C-alpha cells in the first residue's frame, strides 16, 4: 500500500527543494525506474511489458476505432515487424514523421517536427543510448515537462498494428521507430491514444521544453512579429502555428492547399530580394508529410524566378514532402495563431539570457477558502492566493522610460485527471495591482478586501478556458500584488504561476509561512469552582474521571444546541487523547476543565461567525472563525482543513470546528516541545505513539 497522500506531498516538496523534478533529475512517472527495470530484464533474459500502459484496447482508448476494427489490432514489437529495426536511423528529421490517418494529433506531431530542429531540446526528450541492438530488452523511455516538473516515462515497445502496419504515427523509413515510440510515451502520459485526439500545439511545445511560452494572434500581430520570429528561429525555440477551424471539425483542404483546423511546424524564416524589393518568407511543414500551399512562393510558384540563383538554390526544394514557403503577409492571413516556446526570453527583445529572472510557485484554488473568483466578486476576490513582487529599475531608469517590457506572467492550470480527455479547464486569469498606499507597503500576509477596491493597473487581457494564460507587461519599478484566479468563485483547481522579470525582483506568496496561535477573542469566563466543576462531577465515574463515552454524553447534553450535529464517539476519543496528560484514556478534573474552557470558547466563536445562521460554518466563514480563534494559517493549510473537516457540501459542524481547532493547538504544541528549532527527530516508536494517541 502506498503512503498517504500527505506523506507523498511532503516527500515531493522535499524532493523539489533538492532539485528533483529538474530536467537532469526527473521524477519517475508512475514510480517506474527505467534503469532498474532494464537491468532486471537483462538479468532475467526478459522482454519488458508495461503493466501501467499494457498492450490492450484500454491503451488505445474509446472513440477512435469501431469495435470491429479494434479486434483487428495486434500489438507487435518492431523486431517482429521488420528484419532490422532501428530506434533512430541516420538522425532525426521532421521528414521522418508521417501522421496516421486515425488519430487527430497534428498538434503533437507539429511539435515533434519543431523538436527535430533543436538538438539540445531533442536530447532532453529522447535520452541517448537507446537501441534495438545492444542490451535490448523491449524497454524505452522519454522525458516530458508536466506542470512544472520533468518526468521520465517508461514504455515497452509493443505498438498497435493492423495487417503488420502501424496505425498511428509512422516514419518515412519503415525500420525506424523513434517517432512511434515517442508518441506512445506521450499517449501514456495523456492516458491513452484517444486522449491525444485534438489539442493545442502550445501544450506539446511546453511539454517538450518546460520553457516560456508566447502566443500571438495573427489577425492582429505585433508590429515586431517578424523580428521576434527571426530571433526565435536562431535561438533555442520551438515554433508552430495553426489554421482557423472551418464550419466543421473536419480537416478540409482549401483550394490553396492549406488545411483547416490543422497544426503546422514553422521551420524557417528568410528575407529575399524579389525584383529588387525585399520579401519576408516563412517556411512551414505539414505533419501529414504531404499537402502544401499552392499560392505565391509555393514550390512551383513563378515568384522564385524573381530571386537570385543563390537564394533559389538555398531555399527551394520541389517535392510533395509537406514543406513549403509563403510570404509573411499570406502567413498572417492563412493562419490564426503562432506559438513560440523557448528556454529563454531573449528572443523577445534580443537580450541575453542572464537579464531575465525566473521564479514560479505551485498553488491551489479551493472552493470556499481560496477560490474567490475574478474582480466581479468583490467580497471574495481577496481570498484568492496573492503574490507580492518588488520590481527594481532597469539601469537606473523605469521600464516605461526605457520603452521595454520587463515582466511576463504565466498562469497554467494543472489537471489531476489520469486521462487527458476527462480534464476540464476553468476560465482562468490574473490581475496585477500597484501598491501605492503607504499603509500597505511592505505588508506581510494577505491584502484585505479594501485594498482591491482599487482598479487593477495591469491584468491578463481576458479570462480564457485554456491550460495557460500569459501576459507581457511594462511596469514602473515598485511593489505589486499578483492575484491568480478562476473567473467564477468556488472552482477548485491547482495551478503553476511563473514570473519572468527583466530586473532583480523579490517574489513571495502573501501568506503566513508557519502556524501561529494566540489567545482567541475573549468570550464568556469559565468559573472553575462553580458550573464547570458541577458539570464534571455530574458525569464523572467512581474515580472522578471522564472517559470518551461520558464526555460524549456531557457534550451532547450541555453544549450542542439547535440544529447542530451531536458529537461522535470517535471525536470524543480524539479530544480525550489530546487533553489526557497522564495517558490513561480518561480526563481528571484539571484536564477536563482545560478542555471545557476551550470547547465553550470555540462554541461561542462558532456561532458568532455563523453569519448565515445555518447552524454550521460554510468554508468562507471558516477563515474568519479560525482567525477569531487566534489561529493564523497559510492558504495551503486552510485548504487542507477544508478538505479534512468539511462536509460533502463544504460545511463544518460544531463538532468538526472544535476538533479542528483543538488539533491545530495540540499539534503545534507537540512540535514546539519536541523541536530543536528547526525540526523534530523521533524514533519509530515515539512517532507511532504520537500518531496513534493524539
Image (cartoon, helix red, strand yellow):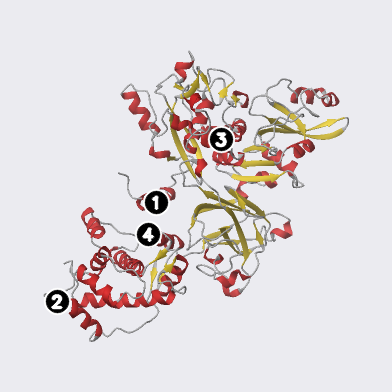
Q: Which residue is mark 2?
A: 544
Q: CA distance from mark 2 to mark 3?
A: 70 Å
Q: Is residue 79 above or below residue 612?
A: above
Q: Does residue 629 appear in this view?
A: no
Q: CA distance from mark 2 to mark 4?
A: 34 Å
Q: Which residue is mark 3?
A: 197
Contact between marks 3 and 1 (CB within 8 A): the answer is no
Contact between marks 2 and 4 (CB within 8 A): the answer is no
Closer-to-camera residue (302/569): 569
Give the SS element for disc 3.
loop
| Earlier residue among tags 2 and 3 | 3
| Earlier residue among tags 3 and 4 | 3
Give the SS element for disc 1.
helix
Q: CA distance from mark 1 to mark 4?
A: 15 Å
Give how far across and how far down residue 590 sits, in percent. Answer: 21, 77
Specify whether 360 is left or right of 215.
left
| Earlier residue among tags 1 and 4 | 1
User: In the rendered image, which quarter contains the C terminus?
Assistant: bottom left
User: In the rendered image, which quarter contains the N terminus?
Assistant: top left
Amino acid at each position: 500500500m502506498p503512503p498517504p497522500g500527505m506523506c507523498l506531498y511532503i516527500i515531493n516538496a522535499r524532493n523539489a527543494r533538492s532539485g528533483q523534478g529538474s530536467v537532469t533529475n526527473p521524477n519517475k512517472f508512475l514510480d517506474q525506474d527505467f534503469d532498474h527495470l532494464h537491468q532486471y530484464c537483462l538479468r532475467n533474459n526478459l522482454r519488458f511489458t508495461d503493466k501501467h500502459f499494457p498492450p490492450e484496447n484500454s491503451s488505445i482508448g474509446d472513440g477512435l476505432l469501431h469495435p470491429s476494427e479494434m479486434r483487428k489490432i495486434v500489438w507487435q514489437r518492431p523486431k517482429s515487424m521488420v528484419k532490422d529495426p532501428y530506434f533512430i536511423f541516420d538522425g532525426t528529421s521532421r521528414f521522418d514523421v508521417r501522421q496516421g490517418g486515425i488519430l487527430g494529433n497534428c498538434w503533437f506531431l507539429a511539435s515533434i517536427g519543431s523538436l527535430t530542429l533543436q538538438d539540445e531540446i531533442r536530447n532532453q526528450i529522447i535520452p541517448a543510448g537507446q537501441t534495438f541492438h545492444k542490451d535490448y530488452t523491449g524497454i524505452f523511455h522519454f522525458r516530458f515537462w508536466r506542470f512544472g516538473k520533468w518526468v521520465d516515462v517508461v514504455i515497452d515497445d509493443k505498438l498497435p498494428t493492423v495487417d503488420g502496419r502501424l496505425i498511428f504515427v509512422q516514419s518515412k523509413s519503415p525500420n525506424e521507430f523513434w517517432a512511434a515510440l515517442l508518441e506512445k510515451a506521450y499517449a501514456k502520459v495523456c492516458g491513452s491514444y484517444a486522449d491525444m485526439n485534438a489539442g493545442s500545439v502550445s501544450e506539446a511545445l511546453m511539454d517538450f521544453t518546460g520553457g516560456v511560452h508566447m502566443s500571438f494572434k495573427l489577425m492582429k500581430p505585433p508590429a515586431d512579429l517578424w523580428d521576434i520570429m527571426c530571433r526565435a528561429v536562431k535561438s533555442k525555440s520551438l515554433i508552430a502555428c495553426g489554421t482557423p477551424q472551418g464550419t466543421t471539425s473536419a480537416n478540409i483542404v482549401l483550394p490553396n492547399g492549406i488545411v483547416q483546423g490543422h497544426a503546422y511546424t514553422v521551420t524557417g524564416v528568410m528575407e529575399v530580394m524579389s525584383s529588387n524589393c525585399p520579401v519576408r518568407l516563412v517556411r512551414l511543414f505539414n505533419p501529414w508529410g504531404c499537402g502544401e500551399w499552392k499560392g505565391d512562393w509555393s514550390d512551383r510558384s513563378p515568384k522564385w524566378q524573381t530571386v537570385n540563383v543563390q537564394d533559389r538554390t538555398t531555399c527551394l526544394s520541389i517535392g510533395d514532402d509537406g514543406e513549403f514557403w509563403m510570404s509573411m503577409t499570406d502567413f498572417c492571413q492563412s493562419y490564426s495563431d503562432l506559438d513560440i516556446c523557448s528556454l529563454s526570453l531573449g528572443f523577445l527583445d534580443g537580450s541575453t539570457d542572464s537579464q531575465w529572472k525566473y521564479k514560479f510557485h505551485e498553488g491551489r484554488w479551493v472552493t470556499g477558502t481560496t477560490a474567490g473568483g475574478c474582480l466581479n466578486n468583490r467580497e471574495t476576490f481577496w481570498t484568492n492566493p496573492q503574490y507580492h513582487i518588488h520590481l527594481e529599475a532597469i539601469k537606473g531608469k523605469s521600464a516605461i522610460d526605457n520603452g521595454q517590457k520587463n515582466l511576463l506572467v504565466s498562469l497554467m492550470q494543472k489537471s489531476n485527471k489520469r486521462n487527458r480527455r476527462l480534464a476540464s479547464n476553468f476560465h482562468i486569469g490574473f490581475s496585477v495591482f500597484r501598491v501605492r498606499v503607504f499603509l500597505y507597503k511592505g505588508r506581510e500576509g494577505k491584502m484585505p478586501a479594501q485594498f482591491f477596491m482599487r482598479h487593477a493597473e495591469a491584468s491578463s487581457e481576458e479570462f480564457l478556458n485554456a491550460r495557460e494564460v500569459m501576459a507581457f507587461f511594462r511596469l514602473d519599478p515598485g511593489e505589486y500584488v499578483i492575484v491568480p484566479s478562476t473567473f467564477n468563485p468556488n472552482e477548485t483547481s491547482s495551478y503553476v504561476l511563473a514570473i519572468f522579470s527583466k530586473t532583480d525582483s523579490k517574489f513571495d506568496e502573501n501568506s503566513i509561512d508557519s502556524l501561529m496561535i494566540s489567545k482567541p477573542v475573549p468570550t464568556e469566563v469559565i468559573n472553575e469552582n462553580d458550573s464547570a466543576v458541577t458539570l464534571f462531577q455530574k458525569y464523572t465515574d467512581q474515580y472522578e474521571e471522564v472517559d470518551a463515552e461520558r464526555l460524549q454524553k456531557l457534550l451532547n447534553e450541555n453544549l450542542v444546541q439547535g440544529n447542530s450535529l451531536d458529537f461522535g464517539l470517535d471525536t470524543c476519543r480524539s479530544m480525550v487523547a489530546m487533553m489526557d496528560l497522564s495517558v490513561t484514556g480518561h480526563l481528571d478534573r484539571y484536564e477536563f476543565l482545560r478542555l471545557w474552557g476551550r470547547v465553550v470558547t470555540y462554541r461561542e466563536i462558532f456561532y458568532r461567525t455563523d453569519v448565515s445562521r445555518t447552524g454550521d460554518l460554510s468554508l468562507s466563514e471558516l477563515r474568519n472563525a479560525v482567525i477569531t480563534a487566534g489561529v493564523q494559517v497559510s492558504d495551503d493549510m486552510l485548504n487542507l482543513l477544508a478538505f479534512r473537516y468539511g462536509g460533502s457540501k463544504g460545511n463544518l459542524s460544531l463538532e468538526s470546528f472544535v476538533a479542528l481547532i483543538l488539533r491545530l493547538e495540540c499539534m503545534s504544541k507537540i512540535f514546539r516541545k519536541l523541536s530543536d528549532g528547526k525540526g523534530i527527530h523521533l524514533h519509530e516508536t515515539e512517532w507511532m505513539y504520537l500518531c496513534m494517541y493524539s
